[in-house]
Image: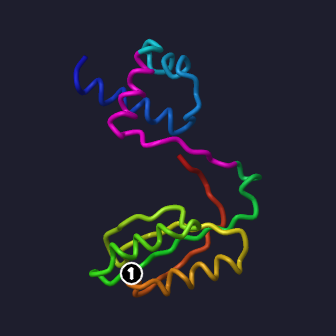
Amino acid sequence: MTTGFMRDTDTRLLDLLRVNAREPTASLARKLGLARSTVQERIARLEREGTIKGYTVRLSDTADAGKLRAVVMISTDPKRADRVAIELRKMPEVRSLAAVAGTFDLIATVETDTPARIDALLDRIGRTNGVARTVSSIVLSEKFTR
């Protein structure tokens, strides 16, 4: 097998797993045109190499009903950006944090179950040592997730 084929096949495998990480190996193998054992070996290698870091649960809209999500753009003091990330990691309501280029330094996705809790969380983020400024947007609906 060529390296290009392996990369393309691994990419297609990862795309299928993003859609449904619980899809049976036999089904993945049929879609990829590979033997089931080959697909199992590829998944094991991707896990070993750290390409696949883990699997998660995505809740249905019904199960997720009542949750409030917001995207928080954060400007930091450059000397304290690492410390801000460490502090935000301690907040379980912060679901993800990404470093970005542009006007803001970080973008956090946060989730709570009431408007009062999201308000308190946004205040807590704003008071975090090293945070210079935040701008928040409440997520009204999610159009799709991969």
Give residue 28's position: percent from left, percent from top.
Answer: 51, 22
Point out the image quarter for the N terminus. Answer: top left
Q: Secondary structure at mark 1?
A: strand
Q: Which residue in the structure is indicated by mark 1? A: 75
Task: Name the one closer to the observer, 30 or 112.
Answer: 112
Amino acid bearing label 1: Ser
Q: Is residue 54 magenta?
A: yes
Give residue 36's position: percent from left, percent from top.
Answer: 47, 14
Task: Name the one closer to the observer, 70 or 43.
Answer: 43
Give residue 32's position: percent from left, percent from top.
Answer: 45, 20
| Left or right of 85, for residue 24 | right
| Left or right of 125, for residue 47 | left
Residue shown at the point (53%, 21%) measured from the top left:
25
Residue 87's image quarter? bottom left
Residue shown at the point (45%, 65%) measured from the top left:
97
Q: Magenta residues?
A: 38-59
| Left or right of 23, for residue 117 | right
In the rendered image of this protein, does residue 5 appear above or below residue 95?
above
